[in-house]
Image: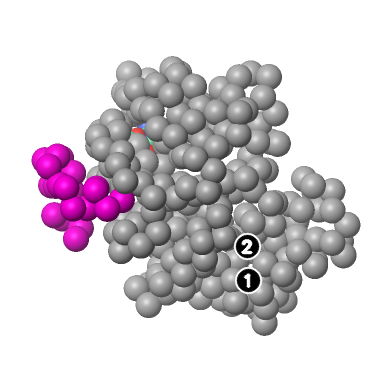
Amino acid sequence: MIEITGVSKYYGEFEVLKNCSTRVEKGEVVVVCGPSGSGKSTLIKCVNALEPFQKGSIRVDGIEVGDPGTDLPDLRSRVGMVFQNFELFPHLTIETNIMLAQRIVLGRSEDAARKKAMELLDRVGLSAQALKYPSQLSGGQQQRVAIARALAMNPMAMLFDEPTSALDPEMISEVLDVMSALARDGMTMMVVTHEMGFARRVANRVIFIDRGEIVEDRPTEEFFTDRRNPRTEAFLSKIL
Ligand code: ADP
Ligand code: MG
């Protein structure tokens, strides 16, 4: 579903991604971890073309992201993205937040968009909040709305960039539970997170990035039990 081959990216002289390669099969969940500033956000932003890259290739469902002929708005509408800070529209109700892109990008009727929004709010356990505004919800609830909003586009894959990092500790599990359910339903996911319990329970593979380099890319169980890479070890010993 996602195929990253020999990708390098520069900010001026600074090589932020160094010859990165990996692939995410359909239905697979891959957790990406690594120190702050190592290039995790940059890597997943390259996947849905929020950042350009200079070398290599990224294909999503066979579509070449770096090809100038690729319809990027279309690609972005089919790869859901969830950010650390929710990024909901503050002046719109929860329901309207979830309806907006369905109406504008997919051209769904108001009734169809509302039906889909209510269905997804039910799925993330927030049916009762439909007519509230984002500021009236907790951080955990807002992040679940952001996930519902991404799902409303029927994405073929979902990218998460530290979805629980801005949350108070007691709200982390409600968001991870929604993500686990999504994974169980077969969604293809790339998840940047330091929640290693989640990684262990849900991920098929774990990627460790350090200074722009994919240092490890291994099946989850092996990643945690067969620990021999000193860079990974140094990182894990700080967060576990
Ligand atoms: P991570 O998500 O792993 O914390 P990022 O992908 O956000 O790391 O950033 C990787 C590196 O690229 C960092 O050193 C960061 O300072 C640098 N960087 C990120 N965005 C820009 C930018 N727009 N211009 C220049 N450097 C950037
Ligand atoms: Mg980041």
Asked whether disc 2 touches disc 1, contact meaning CB atoms under 8 Å apart, the reply is yes
Across and down, in percent, residue 31 comes to 38, 49
**Residue ID at (63%, 39%):** 76
| Amino acid beneath label 2 | Ala
- Horizontal side of residue 1 vs 174, given as left or right: right
- Horizontal side of residue 11 vs 159, given as left or right: left
Query: Observer-nearest residue: 231 or 132?
Result: 231
Q: Is residue 94 above or below residue 31?
A: below
> CB of residue at label 1: within 8 Å of ligand 2?
no
| Quadrant that contains the C terminus | bottom left
Circle on res. 123: 1
Circle on res. 181: none
Task: Provide the residue span drawn in magenta.
Answer: 220-240
Across and down, in percent, residue 114 comes to 80, 66
Residue position for label 2: 148
| Amino acid beneath label 1 | Arg
Q: Nearer the viewer, mark 2 or mark 1?
A: 1
Residue 165 seen by the camera: no
Q: Secondary structure at mark 1?
A: helix
Query: Observer-nearest residue: 124 or 168?
Result: 124
Q: Secondary structure at mark 2?
A: helix
